[in-house]
Structures are given as C-alpha cells and as structure tokens.
Image: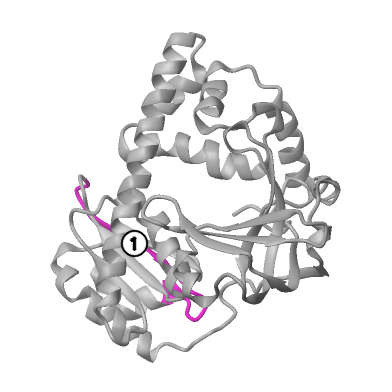
Amino acid sequence: MVPLSGENRTLVYWGLEVFKKERRLGLSAIARKAGVSLSKTTSEDIAFSFAPRINVAGRLDHATLAGELLGTDSEEEAEWLSSRLESLNFERKKKADEIFKEIKVMVAGKKDFDIVACGKKEWPVGVLAAVSSRVAEAFSKTTVLWGQGDSQKIKGSARSSGDVNVRDLLLKAGEEMYQDVGGHPAASGFTLKEEFAGEFEKRLGDAFKSMPKDENILDEILIEDELSLEDANAENIKLISRFEPFGQKNQKPVFLFKNVKVEEMRVFGNGGLHLEMKFRNSNNVSIPAVGFWMSGAVESAGAGDRIDLAASMENSTYRGYDELRLKKIDF
C-alpha cells in the first residue's frame, strides 16, 4: 500500500477536495446508495463506501459496469448501473457473512487449533480476502481460506494474526502446490493446484507448527494519549479531521479511555457480526462505541463492567444522520 506522506499525501488531500465537488452522475449515485454525503467525503468513505462498490463489479460481474457508471452522462443510466452495483455489493456482503458463519461453526467443532485453514470449492474467490481478514481478527488466529466458485482455478487468501509471515508459511507448506503465490508478510494470495486441495489444510498446519513466531508482523496499536469521555466531543473531532487524509503512515489517532464504565452492550448487523457499547460521561451525555467484526468479544465484558478502551473518534454521517461516536480498536 502507498504511504500517505510527502507528495502522496498532497495528491490525496487535493484529490479529496476535488472529489467533494465532483459532479459526475455516477459518483453522486454511488454516494446516495451508500448513504454518504459527497461534500463531506473522507478517506474512510473512499475506502469503505466507494471502493467496495466500484471493485465489486470485477469481483462478481464485469469491471466494465463500474467504468460505464463513472463515465455516463445519463441520469437514468447512472441510477440503473449504481443499483446494479449496490445489488452486487449486497450479494458480496451476504456471501461473506455466510462464509464467516460457516467458518465459525467449523472452528467451534475444534478443541485446540493453531491456525484457521479451510476452504470449499463453492466459495467464490472474490470475497475471500475480506473474509480471511475478518476471521483472523475475530479469532486472533492466522487464517488461510480458499475457494473456486465460478472461477476456473482454486484461489485463496491468507492473513496473519501477527505471529507468522503468511507468505513464508504458504511456501513452507510446499511450493509445488501452487501455480502462483504473492503478497507480503501480513497478507498473501495464491492459486492452488487442484490435486493438492485434499492435503492442503494438513500441510499448512504442519508448516505452522515449525514456523518461527514473530509478534511484530502486524503493527502494534499506537496510543496517542489518554483521554476522558468528556474529550470525545465535536470540537476535538474537528481538530483531528485537519490531519486527513488518514491511511498508511498517517493513521487516524487512537486514544486510551481508561477505566470507563460500560452502560450498554449489544451485537448488531447481519447475524450479529458487530459490537456496540455505550458509555456516559460526567455531563450525562451518552457516547456510543462501535467495533466492526468484533462480536466475538461480547463475552469479554458486559453492562456495568469497567474497561480500558482503545478507540479513535469520528463523526459518523451514515444514512445522512450525524453521530459522534468512538470506533473501537481494542479493549
């Protein structure tokens, strides 16, 4: 990934400023479907709202759909194409959720395991990267998934939980098993030869046991400062936004909220995949905090408990509704 520093930061900053004033019908249509205000677009909106809807065309249909949408000067065509991409994006998320739930059942049946390694031919390759990241985060285990779907080849995605170099892990399991392997220590992709599908999981497990463990594969959480819940306010969020755009080498600041009392706690999203907590500051203002793909942590704390929370601050504009909230990183 490209670091957002130096001239890259300048290009992205001014690119976002131009983007906010964009009059392309296709981008406006995507923004409406995503519930994002085009004039308030942030780097996170690009990463989590616009990019998935544009990329899904090539993953589940054909990339020309996105190209046609971005180039159209017809409102009717923009509406039709954006609706098609929205439908594909919903299909992608639904399939990813289904696979994630399948994997949770598979993992629940295992007493002790060092690595999550599994695959099915019916799993579409276009969603595996997102699912492998989610599984690695949910179980704190290095994860390797593979599938085929409508593809001619078996392809997979690997994510490190921070303990091993996943590219080295794939190669140590046996270079002869792949048509190709790419990526870096934290995330890799591969094409598996069909004749090795039956033994792949075992060979990965054996290779993992003999791999040197490195706790520094993933970046540690960098805490900028310790704050109180009273500091989570609109004024400070506005100050933080001046450091946009956030991304590689310019991460959004994460703060420590120490010994805060959980007022409410619930899971939400399709099948209860995400976690929401609510806190209350000394001014009797309720402060929500969300953790995406963190529902597995629901048993780690409950209403009335006091926790140390690492989180960033943001102003969510989802569906056009402004809400100050914390975005949980860990607790």
Residue drawn at x 31%, y 39% as measured from the top left: 60
Q: Residues within 10 Å of mark 1 (few under 14, many from 20)?
A: many
Q: Which quarter of the figure has residue 224?
A: bottom right
Residue 62 in picture, x, y percent from top left:
33, 31
Residue 162 vertical position relative to residue 38 in the rendered view, above or below:
below
Quarter the C terminus occupies: bottom right
What residue is rendered at 44% in x and 24% in y? 82
In the image: residue 111, left or right of residue 23? left
Q: Position of residue 106 (x, y in %)?
A: 25, 71
| Residue type, mark 1 in image | Phe
Q: How is the image coloured?
A: one colour
Local secondary structure at mark 1:
strand
Q: Is residue 182 visible?
A: no
In the depicted view, which residue is nearer to us: 219 or 212? 219
Is 235 placed left or right of 151 in the picture? Answer: right
Q: Relative to 80, say whether 227 is above or below.
A: below
Total numbered circles: 1
Q: Is residue 282 visible?
A: yes
Residue plotted at (33% across, 84% down): 113
Q: Is residue 17 left or right of residue 182?
A: right
Q: Which residues are the magenta region?
A: 151-168
Residue 122 versus residue 102 in the image, above or below: above
183 or 224: nearer the viewer: 224
Q: Please give the residue where the numbered disc 1 appears in the rendered image.
A: 190
Measured as percent of width and height from the top left, residue 278 is found at 63, 59
Image position of 86 (left or right of 148):
right
Residue 321 in percent (x, y) is at: 64, 35
Q: Is residue 127 magenta?
A: no
Residue found at x 64% / y 29%: 37
Quarter of the N terminus within the rendering? bottom right
